């Protein structure tokens, strides 16, 4: 989708990046809004998939 983008917000961490993430299946947020197929996510909420999960 592209390179990570700097997150410039009062509550962001210094040097924090935003990543575009796409999903294979539609996703819904905690309030039931959606469906979403892609979203911009703060790097602190992402983790790498391990070999056993792939």
Image (cartoon, helix red, strand yellow):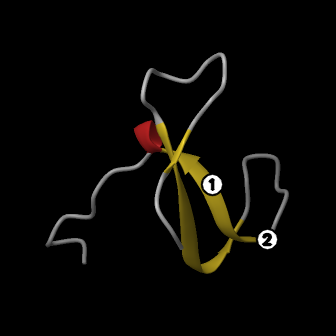
CB contact under 8 Å: marks 2 and 1: no
> Extreme top residue here?
10
* Quadrant in which the N terminus is drawn: bottom right
Residue 25 in the image, given as x and y percentages of width and height: 61, 81
Q: Earlier in the sequence, mark 2 or mark 1?
A: 2
| Alpha-carbon span between mark 2 and mark 1 | 14 Å
Callout 2: helix, strand or loop?
Answer: loop
Where disc 1 sits, the SS reads: strand
Q: Residue at x 46, y 61 (%)?
A: 3
The mark found on residue 35 in the picture is 2
- Mark 2 vs mark 1, foreground winner is 1
Q: Position of residue 48 (x, y in %)?
A: 28, 58
Q: Position of residue 36 (x, y in %)?
A: 74, 69
31, above or below 36, in the image: above
Left or right? Give the position of 13 relative to 35: left
Question: Crowding near pointer 2: few (<14 within 10 Å), some, many (20+)?
Answer: few
What residue did someone put label 1 on? 40
Instruction: Using residue 51 as the reference point, say whether residue 19 is left or right of it.
Output: right
Indicate which disc residue 13 carries: none
Which one is nearer the viewer's eye here, 8 or 33?
8
- The C terminus - image quarter: bottom left
Image point (45%, 33%), residue name? 16
Depth check: 29 or 40 in front?
A: 40
Q: Quadrant of residue 26?
A: bottom right
């Amino acid at each position: 989708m592209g390179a990570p983008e700097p997150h410039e917000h009062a509550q962001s961490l210094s040097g924090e990046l935003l990543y575009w993430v796409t999903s294979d299946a539609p996703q819904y947020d905690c309030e039931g809004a959606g469906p979403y197929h892609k979203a911009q996510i703060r790097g602190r909420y992402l983790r790498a998939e391990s070999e056993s999960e792939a």
